[in-house]
Each structure stands twice: as structure tokens, then as C-alpha cells.
Image (cartoon, helix red, strand yellow):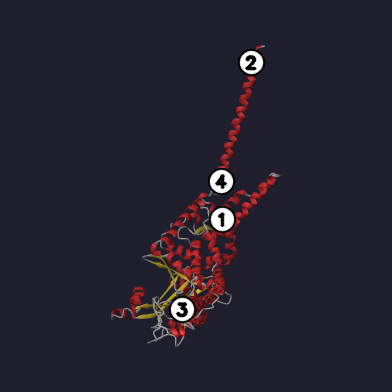
Amino acid sequence: MAIDTQAKKLLDRWEALKLERNNTENVWQEISDNELGRRNFIAKRTPGEQRMQRIYDGTSKVAGEDLAGALHSLMTNPSAPWFELRFEMPELNEMQLAMRWLYAVEKRLQAALMRPEANFNAQMSEVYIDLVYFGTCGLFVDDNLTQGTLFSARPLSEIYVAENSAGRIDTVFLHFSFTARQAVQEFGKRDKRAMRNVETGKTEEKAEYLHAIMPNEDYREGFFGKRGRKWSSFKLSITDMEVFEEKGYAELPIAVARWNKDSDEVYGRGPGWSALSDAKMLNEMMKVTLKAAQKAVDPPLLVDHDGVLGTNLRVEPGATIPIDMTTALLNPPVQALESRMRFDIASATIQGTRDAVKNAFRHQLIEMIRDPRMTATQVLELSAQIQRLLAPVLGRLQTELLEPIVERLYAIEIRAGRIPPPPPEIAGAPLRIDYTSPIARAQKSSDARAIVDFFTIVTNMSQVDQSVLDVADMDTGARNIAESLGVPPTVVRTRAEVEERRAAQAEILEEQQALSQMGEVATAAGKVAPLLQEGGAS
């Protein structure tokens, strides 16, 4: 059998990426075993097997899942739009025609995300879990011809990545296993081994596969076929060392994001990394404390070897123990061995370690977000804390996770003809993504607060000198506040509409003033007429 040189080249590169990931996946397995209680990396377990053997305290599990849920709610809230589209050229955002088209596009994209078949929200929950605990996550955005856009959170164990010179992930290898039946469903007749196994009844026999996605070295803009796609895609059977599918993507179909990362590393580090040492110590302390508590509640017994008759020492409730009364008069033949465990010290140490684990998962911030009784001042303070604690992380997540999702979804919907073509006046104008999730608005609220404070100060100063009002541009300030608060653009009038209204109001005012002047002239004439008549009569 001839060697598939393309398959060998891809397998060699995957082996190099595997070697680079060795140390990282060792830590991932420790986080899984001591904090989360699920996910396999280097450990091989059967489905359904108990994985909580090392976890004696659930603080890290609860705190991490709370943080993942909070991120889901604050960044990609299923119940509210979390992004808007804008034109890069500000003047286009003032055109009603352009804004109506953008609004229609946003609604189409949001509908595509919310389709039950797309499975976006359920998959994002798994993405945030991986991100919080392991610091790296991956979401595949697939363009299915019959079902539309589909989202799939890829298990971190199967993701191998490489960066380009700018530090952006541009190469992704997915390593996975399929049964013969699954392979035929996914690849059809292209996978010959799977087809043979199904035909011979070996439907559950598994094989290993690779899906390699990387920049297309032959890409040429404006060309068709493989040369016209920015990303090359190869699917191959590791078992057969054969590439059975080669195609391309116009966009990178998988978004791989990191919580934060060291400059010389590829994979991210999340709160789970920060909490690992404390979580391991907490589990060990709880294990020892539970043993001590068990001894205190059901202590071991000291038994006089001559004091108890027979060998049947019974310790269950209501049991009787035959004893030798001659020895019992001098010393009890059976007595408990008292534990001298300092539960107060253990409790204080455990609580301190629990607090350290919670702090690693931003527990205090989550508690503030959950509080329904927050005042306006507390909301502003929360905004400041979000910026201080999460701003670097949010910036990275918007760049590596949310932006690729929206761009890929937009491109898929455009190619499928599900987005209306833009009016000729704005065709080809570049777009940008504005995030309107609660956490994005919290970041922007500081701008709104600064503008309001500035206007308040200027208004107070105007009581002394009204000319200071000329410094403040009220129109621009109001628009910036509306944008910071996430006010729908359809509610805010464009500059042209405002000018038209002001011109109409000025015209009405001029007419009223003219009528008023005419009325005053008529009144004056009415007063003068009798005097003129009297003069004529004399």
C-alpha cells in the first residue's frame, strides 16, 4: 500500500503539537480530578465511571460553575441581544436607510443563534466551563446545508493548536474517535474502512481520526476552488493513514479562546489554575477532618483482654456486652478512646482556604451581580470592579471568541441568502461589532457617568457665568450616553432629523413672533384710531 504523503505530513505535525501540550494536559487532569470532577485528558476512564474520588469539598466545583454561569449570563445572555452591528464610517450610522438595514441583519443573526437546532446556548455553557477551569475553550461553527448553522463545543482533550507570528491561533487539529456507524453518518462513502465495517456488521468498531484546519498557502483572493479559500481543511484516518477529505473554509470555523496566557505559551490559564493548589489542600484537609469527625462520633474502643467474656464484642445500638465483673469493679473493661482533634483550628483553616478558592473564581463579584437590591451607586461601583477585575479577560474573549462567532455566522447567512442585500448607498461599507451584553454595558457605563458628572458641573458653573455652557456639546454627549447605555439606535434621532426638527421649530417660532408683532401693531392701531377720529372731528 502506497504511503499517503499528505497524511504523513499532517500526522507528524500533530505529533509535534501533542508533545508541546504534554505538560499542560497534566495540569488539566489535576484540575479535573481535584476541582471539576469531569473531563478526561491523560486519564482513561469508561463512560459513566465515578470521577469524584479526590473531591472532598465542593467549593471549587460550585464557585467555578457559578462563574461560568455568570459569564454566560453577562456576555451572551440567551434572553437579550448581546451584540449590535455598526458601520466603521460614523456618517453612515446617521442614515436611516443604513440603520434599518443593520437592524434587519441583527435580527436575522440573532434568530440564527436562537434556533433550537443551532444549540448555541447549550454549547456555550460547556465552553464557559472549559474556559473558567482550564483557561482554554473551543467552539466549532459549522455550516450545514440542510440544518443551517450548527454550534458544537469541542472537548478540550481533542484540541491541539498553534499560533501565528502575531499570537493569534491559526492552526487547529481535532483528534477524535468514531464508531464505524458514526463515521459513515459523518463521512459517507469517503471512509472506505468504515463502510466495510458497517457492511460486515462491525458497526461499533472504533477508529481514530484527525481534522486539520490551517491557513491555505495557495490562497489567492478572487480565485475559485481551493485557491479561493483562506483556510485549508483535511480529514484523515489515523488508522489507515489516509486523507479522505480535502476542502476549504472562507473563515476559520472554530473559535479557540484563552482566559489569559503567558507570552511563551499557546494554551491559556484560567481561574482553575489559580485555585488548584488551594483546592488540593482543601480536599486533603476535608479528608482528614472527616476521618477525625468519624472517630469523634464513633470512637475506637479500648478493651481489657480479660474483662470481656468471649470474642463477640458488639458495638451496634442496643447491643449487650458480657463482661467479667471482678475486673469491672477496678477498671471499665470497655471504654472509648477519646479524640483530641482541634476542630476549631481545622474549621478556621478550612474556611480560610475556601475563601482563597472562592476569590480565585471571583466569588465576591458574582455575589454583587446576584444582589437584586443594588442601588444606583452600587451599580456604578460594580461597573468599576468589573473593569478592574475582568477588563483584560473580556477584551481577549471578545477578540478570540465572540467576534469570530459573529463574523462566521454573518458570512454563513450571507452565502445562504438569508440576509437582505444592502442598499446601493452602503454596499461594501465595512462593519464593526458593538457588544451590548450587560457586562459590556457595565464597562461602558463609566463613560456615561463621566459625561453626566461633567454636564452637572458645567450646569452648576453656569449659575455664575452662563457662557460656560458653550463648552459642553450636549448633542454629542447625549448620543454617547445613549450608546453607552445600549439604547436601540431606532429610538435616537439622527443628526439630520434633529436639524430638521430644530429648523421647523425655529420657523414656527418666527411665525409666532411675526403674528405677535402683527397683533401688537393691530392693538396699537386700535388705540390710535379713536384719537385720530376725535382730532378730525374737532
Give the amino acid at mark 1.
Ser
Residue occupying the point 66% across, 47% down: 459
Q: Which is more foreground, mark 1 or mark 4?
A: 1
Task: Identify the mark nearer the N-term, 3 or 2.
Answer: 3
As measured in the structure, the alpha-carbon distance from the residue carrying label 1 to the one carrying label 3 is 42 Å
The span from disc 3 to disc 4 (Cα, nearest Å) is: 60 Å
Q: Position of residue 466 (x, y in %)?
A: 69, 44
Kind of residue at badge 2: Gln
Which residue bears the numbered disc 3?
41
Residue occupying the point 56% across, 77% down: 265
- Check disc 4 and report its element: helix, strand or loop: helix
Q: Quadrant of residue 165?
A: bottom right
Q: Which residue is mark 1?
A: 484
Crowding at dot 3, Cα within 10 Å, few <14 / some 14-19 / many 20+, comes out as many
Q: Looking at the picture, which amino acid does disc 4 mark?
A: Val
Q: Which mark is residue 311?
A: none
Of callouts 2 and 1, the N-terminal one: 1
| Contact flag, marks 2 and 4 (Cβ < 8 Å) | no
Observer-nearest of 323 and 382:
323
Marker count (numbered): 4
Residue 365, relative to residue 155: is it above or below? above
Residue 440 horizontal/vertical position (percent): 54, 60
Instruction: Determine the CA span between mark 3 and mark 2.
Output: 111 Å
Q: Is residue 257 above or below residue 97?
A: below
Q: Which mark is residue 498?
A: 4
Mark 3 or mark 4: whose residue is earlier in sequence: 3
